[in-house]
């Protein structure tokens, strides 16, 4: 796994040894950033179910600042910390261990303002994505006009509207489906 664009382009990310963490492939990550844009200067990012941190680190590489990574697995938290250090982003990324099945973490001091961009890549087939999408609300968690990128199995279909977010795009890459939501401006 490598960073595909920006300041850390070409850096190799540490990957898990087992199958408890399913990283987003380079191809899918590159496609996501072709959709959402290459220059993410100044965007605040949440990487939920972060796994290796690949999506959030890719965003940092393309100018986002800051990024908060959230995962319940101690192995994932360790991987994200190692990958932030490898890419030189330790000062612009923070990692917390939190079970997102319990809801969103309370506001973290690293992320004082709402996010512009959220990545959601939960374990497939556990039914946590739609309830969590419903908890992402403009103002509290999301900036107006924020984008949420959700990754699912290609056989899963997400609703067109969740709360104050509307799905604006869906693409399939192999066995992976990417859905992009936007909040009202």
Image (cartoon, grey):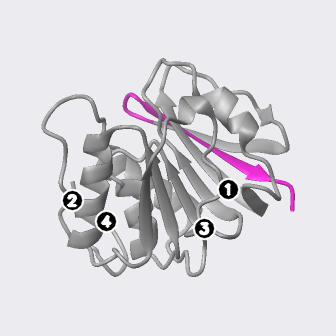
**Mark 4 = which residue?**
4
Q: Report, in whole angstroms, how far the alpha carbon at label 2 lies from the one at label 3.
A: 24 Å
Q: Report, in whole angstroms, how far the alpha carbon at label 3 lies from the one at label 1.
A: 16 Å
**Mark 2 = which residue?**
13
The spot of residue 69 in percent (x, y) is 45, 55
Mark 3 or mark 4, which has the lower sequence index? 4
Give yes or no for contact between labels 4 and 2 (Cβ–Cβ under 8 Å).
no
Mark 4 surroundings: few (<14), some (14-19) or many (≥20) residues within 10 A: many
**Mark 3 = which residue?**
111
Q: Is residue 177 magenta?
A: yes
Residue that appears at 47% across and 49% down: 70
Q: Nearer the viewer, residue 111 or 146?
A: 111
Q: Which residues are magenta?
A: 173-185
Residue 110, quarter of the rendered image: bottom right
**Mark 1 = which residue?**
147
Quarter of the image that includes the C terminus: bottom right
Q: Is residue 3 visible?
A: no
At numbered mark 4, what does the secondary structure look like: helix, strand or loop? loop
Mark 1 or mark 2, which has the lower sequence index? 2
At numbered mark 2, what does the secondary structure look like: helix, strand or loop? loop
Nearer the observer, disc 4 or disc 1? 1
């Amino acid at each position: 796994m490598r960073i595909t664009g920006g300041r850390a382009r070409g850096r190799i990310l540490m990957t898990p040894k087992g199958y408890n963490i399913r990283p987003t492939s380079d191809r899918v990550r590159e496609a996501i950033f072709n959709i959402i844009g290459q220059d993410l200067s100044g965007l605040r990012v949440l990487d939920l179910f972060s796994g290796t941190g690949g999506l959030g680190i890719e965003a940092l590489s393309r100018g986002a600042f800051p990024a908060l990574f959230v995962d319940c697995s101690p192995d994932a938290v360790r991987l994200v910390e190692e990958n932030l250090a490898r890419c030189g982003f330790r000062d612009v990324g923070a990692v917390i261990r939190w079970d997102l099945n319990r809801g969103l973490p309370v506001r973290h001091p690293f992320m004082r303002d709402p996010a512009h961009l959220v990545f959601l890549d939960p374990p497939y087939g556990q039914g946590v994505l739609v309830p969590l999408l419903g908890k992402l609300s403009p103002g509290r968690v999301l900036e107006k006009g924020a984008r949420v990128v959700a990754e699912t199995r290609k056989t899963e279909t997400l609703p067109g509207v969740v709360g104050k977010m509307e799905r604006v795009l869906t693409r399939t890459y192999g066995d992976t489906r990417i859905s992009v939501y936007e909040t009202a401006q």
